Image (tube, helix red, strand yellow):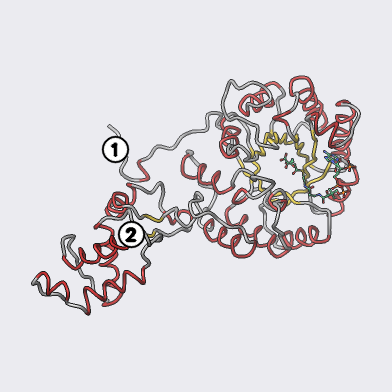
Amino acid sequence: MKLYKTYEDLPKIKLPKGQEVSISDSTLRDGAQMPGIVLKVDHKVKIYEYLHNIGIEKLETFVYNDRDRNAISMMLDRGYEFPEVTGWARAATSDIDLVLDIGAIEETGILMSVSDVHIFDKMGLPSREAAEEKYLDALQYAVDHGLRTRAHIEDMTRADNTNFVYPMIKKILEIDPKCTIRLCDTIGFGIPFVDVEEPFGIPEMVRHVKEELKAVNIETHCHDDFGLAVANSIAGYWHGANWSNVTFLGIGERAGNAELEKLLLFLERRIEGFDKYDLKSLFEFAKFMEREIGIRIPRNKSIVGNNVFAHESGIHTAGVIKNPFTYEPYPPEVVGGKRAFLIGDSSGIEVLRFKVEDTLHDLLDVKISVEKNDPRLRAIQADIQNLYNNEKRVSCISDEEIQAYVEKYFLFEPIVEKSMGRKTL
Ligand SMILES: CC(=O)SCCNC(=O)CCNC(=O)[C@H](O)C(C)(C)COP(=O)(O)OP(=O)(O)OC[C@H]1O[C@@H](n2cnc3c(N)ncnc32)[C@H](O)[C@@H]1OP(=O)(O)O
Ligand SMILES: O=C(O)CCC(=O)C(=O)O
């Protein structure tokens, strides 16, 4: 019989294809496209440093203006081996020239928009053949100029993959067999399950590109319009992709992208043999994004929200006080977070006892045990319950208020002594 009593007891799972997997970050590219935010050069460099500390292998950036170029030069000046700074270009030689002008960039993505609405309406091209020719010409140009390439197959989950996209990817791989084929779920139509028909099933898409077309580098880039971006990214890894392109906090166009931090946590905590990333700065990184870039982080946001290690309800707090394994999926230190116990309308006596003991310790600098049936503790509980019963109070009881209750009932006012005929401290 297996006993799961510590985090170490929990079995990790294996990626079924057993491939080495990596992460490329698009916070500085797709993330920067998020309406209402502006990433300044200093922000980009700081984000680069956080990504470096985590151990992210690669990032991509635009090269269109002086701010892009200054940020690139400052990132490269750091001299870090990773993340590799790579470029991003439309399928146009003029864009690829901008990447080449940087000199130190060795890899670029090339945008290849494949759905009919993109080919005919967005770009105004006369045919799929014209689009293919444009994309292959751009790719050939990049290869001829010594760049490693990624083909960003835009809007693939709304394209005619069988008749147009897959044959084109075959030609891409003839030009550059190592080209990373980025499967872009541009507006989040992808579905993470097997046996889903073309063009929606991420598993089938990855399988086809890997097994039928023999691509050696496959990456997903998934948007979160239907809330499936992380599931689709993991489905990509599950079925043989070796890269996932994501953004920190999922920032990006519309509903954003798959979240970097979610993918990291999944790999680090759930997948066997995954200790190459260091997640300890995630919480601090999120605070930086909130403070400096103005991204409001919902308190229940996985991994980095303020509530992720906060406990209020009676049953949960009583469990976590005894053993955090009861209701915490991993220790807060893993992501640089901190546990908090809060008193609110769903709290019971045990967490109040714990908070009162803690407060007494802070006030008196000695450890004092308080019993659950201590009348002073029960008096505090009654006062707090009254607050909620009046339906006026809509927030937790702050630590300062707990201190005031402790001072009132345990240190200054002998009201419980009077009513219960007992001696207080
Ligand atoms: C799904 C994505 O996230 S794609 C990335 C989106 N991000 C951005 O657009 C931010 C960076 N973009 C920019 O700085 C500017 O749009 C630039 C520098 C690329 C181009 O600027 P402009 O010349 O002013 O063009 P504008 O922004 O008005 O239009 C975009 C152009 O890109 C073209 N384009 C779109 N997809 C592709 C493609 N796959 N290959 C080549 N060109 C493309 C459009 O057809 C359009 O050109 P057109 O007006 O001649 O039809
Ligand atoms: O560069 C890419 O990844 C493709 C464009 C994109 O961001 C997308 O398809 O969502």
Quadrant assignment, res 46: bottom right
Q: Residues within 10 Å of mark 1 (few under 14, many from 20)?
A: few
**Foreground pick, 69 / 103:** 69
**Foreground pick, 360 / 77:** 360
Check disc 1 and give the amino acid type.
Leu
Quadrant housing the N terminus = top left
Residue 315 placed where, x, y %? 29, 49
The reply, left or right, for residue 226 in relation to residue 398 is right
Inter-mark Cα distance, 1 to 2: 40 Å
The residue located at (21%, 70%) in the rendering is: 368
The reply, left or right, for residue 312 in relation to residue 107 is left
Check disc 2 and give the amino acid type.
Tyr
**Foreground pick, 214 / 418:** 418
Give the answer, above or below, for where 131 lies relative to 167: below
Label 2 residue SS? helix
Quadrant hosting ligand 1:
top right
Residue 75 placed where, x, y %? 72, 60
The reply, left or right, for residue 170 in relation to residue 391 is right
Q: Nearer the viewer, mark 1 or mark 2?
A: 2
Give the answer, above or below, for where 273 lies relative to 294: above
What residue would you read off at disc 1? 3
Q: Earlier in the sequence, mark 1 or mark 2?
A: 1
What residue would you read off at disc 2? 388
The total number of labels drawn is 2
The residue located at (80%, 59%) in the rendering is: 69
**Foreground pick, 351 / 248:** 351
Q: Is mark 1 within 8 Å of ligand 2?
A: no
The residue located at (75%, 27%) in the rendering is: 159
Quadrant assignment, res 194: top right
Quadrant assignment, res 398: bottom left
